Amino acid sequence: MSKKPVGLIIKSLIAEKNLSAEQMAKLTGKSRQQVYNDFNRVGMKDDEIEKYTNALQIEKQVVYDLLENKSVEGNESNYLQEHLTNLEEQFKRLLNQIDVKDRQIEGLQKTVDVLLGKSEPGTDEGKVMEMYKFRVA
């Protein structure tokens, strides 16, 4: 039987309470980054789980039941689907960032072309990049 990562369960419970990672950090005495790091954890010590359950004002057993894939008062969530959705959102953001960077590089290439005295940006396209590759190699 495969268990759910405890970090995803805690993240889901925090979201159900409409709390942010920053708010949870204050409630648990952890830093915001530690809370985000905990979301990625597969396992967690009992006292760490207790910090979160106390902050969320729920019983520890709720977390343990969810770890064992037991339904808890209608709180049966498909964590794999949630995880896949999160990964898809991250992937879309990364693709968007790549597109932005590509446009920035294209603009910088045009600037370099103009500074090198080319009459039209786009002539001898890639020549600067080839010269750069030659120097690096």
Image: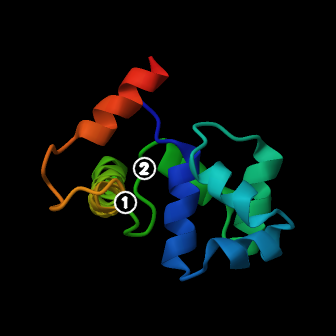
Helix, strand or loop for disc 1:
helix
Of 107 and 88, nearer the camera is 107
Which image quadrant: the C terminus? top left
Helix, strand or loop for disc 2:
loop
Which tag is nearer the camera, tag 2 or tag 1? Answer: 1
Residue 95 appears at what percent x and percent y?
A: 28, 55
Residue 9: mark: none
Of 134 and 53, nearer the camera is 134
Looking at the rendered structure, the kind of residue marked 2 is Lys
Give the mark, 2 or 1, whose residue is nearer the N terminus. 2
Residue 123 appears at what percent x and percent y?
A: 12, 50
In the rendered image, which residue does mark 2 sit on?
70
Looking at the rendered structure, the kind of residue marked 1 is Leu
Residue 115: mark: 1
Camera sees residue 57: no
Residue 109 appears at what percent x and percent y?
A: 31, 54
Task: Please report the residue visible at 23 percent of the width from the left and 56 percent of the height from the top.
Answer: 118
Task: Please report the residue visible at 59 percent of the width from the left and 54 percent of the height from the top.
Answer: 63
Camera sees residue 62: yes
Of 26 and 71, nearer the camera is 26
**Residue that sits furthest to the top in the current view:** 137
Q: CA distance from mark 2 to mark 1?
A: 66 Å
Residue 19 appears at what percent x and percent y?
A: 60, 80
Relative placement, left or right, of 71 versus 21 is left
**Residue that sits furthest to the bottom in the current view:** 18
Is 2 rendered above or below residue 79?
above
Relative placement, left or right, of 70 versus 20 is left
**Residue that sits furthest to the right in the current view:** 29
